[in-house]
Amino acid sequence: MTKPFTGGCACGAIRYAIVGEPLFSNHCQCRDCQRESGTGHGSYATFPRAGVTVTGKARTWDMTGDSGNVKTRAFCPECGVAVYMTFKAMPDIFTIRAASLDEPARYKPQAITYAVRAYDWDPLDSGLTKFEKMPPG
């Protein structure tokens, strides 16, 4: 078994430990992720919820994605750093911001989602599979 993925916010008020490997890792170029990250994309790793432990109290806010599904973004009320997301339509998964990892080099993106909204000034790895929106299924 590999060592857990650990991470949290900048001030340490929110911490997580995740046992298991990511189900999917992606750079998302949707407008919501651009706004939240302050750049051209957000980078995420999604895990089975069963292997996740979170300590600390996050503030959350809900938003409706292009799919019509509600996603809940969680951030630290102390330092303001976005740490993770959950999805009402998929309660069995847990998505972390790649930069929140204690060891960000463990993040290995597999794909680019919402490539239709990409900006020339934010080039990403051209070798990654690109999806115009979210991949099917």
Image (cartoon, rainbow, N blue to C red):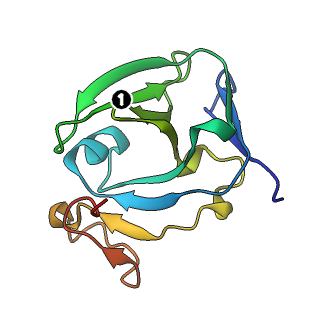
Q: Where is residue 65 in the image (x, y as percent from the top left)?
A: 21, 39
Name the element at disc 1.
loop
Depth check: 123 or 137 in front? 137
Q: Where is residue 81 in the image (x, y as percent from the top left)?
A: 50, 31
Depth check: 47 or 40 in front? 47
Q: Which residue is located at x 50 percent, y 67 percent?
A: 109
Depth check: 113 or 41 in front? 113
**Image quadrant in which the N terminus is located:** bottom right
Q: Which residue is located at x 44 percent, y 33 percent?
A: 86
**Image quadrant in which the C terminus is located:** bottom left
Q: Where is residue 77 in the image (x, y as percent from the top left)?
A: 51, 16
> On screen, 56 above or below 20?
above
> Callout 1, which amino acid?
Lys
Depth check: 80 or 65 in front? 65
Q: Where is residue 96 in the image (x, y as percent from the top left)?
A: 53, 43
Q: Which residue is located at x 77 percent, y 48 percent?
A: 4
Tally of marks: 1
> On screen, 104 above or below 31?
below
Q: Which residue is located at x 64 percent, y 37 percent?
A: 50
Q: Badge 1 is on which residue?
A: 88
**Relative to 102, 32 lies left or right:** left
> On screen, 114 above or below 83?
below
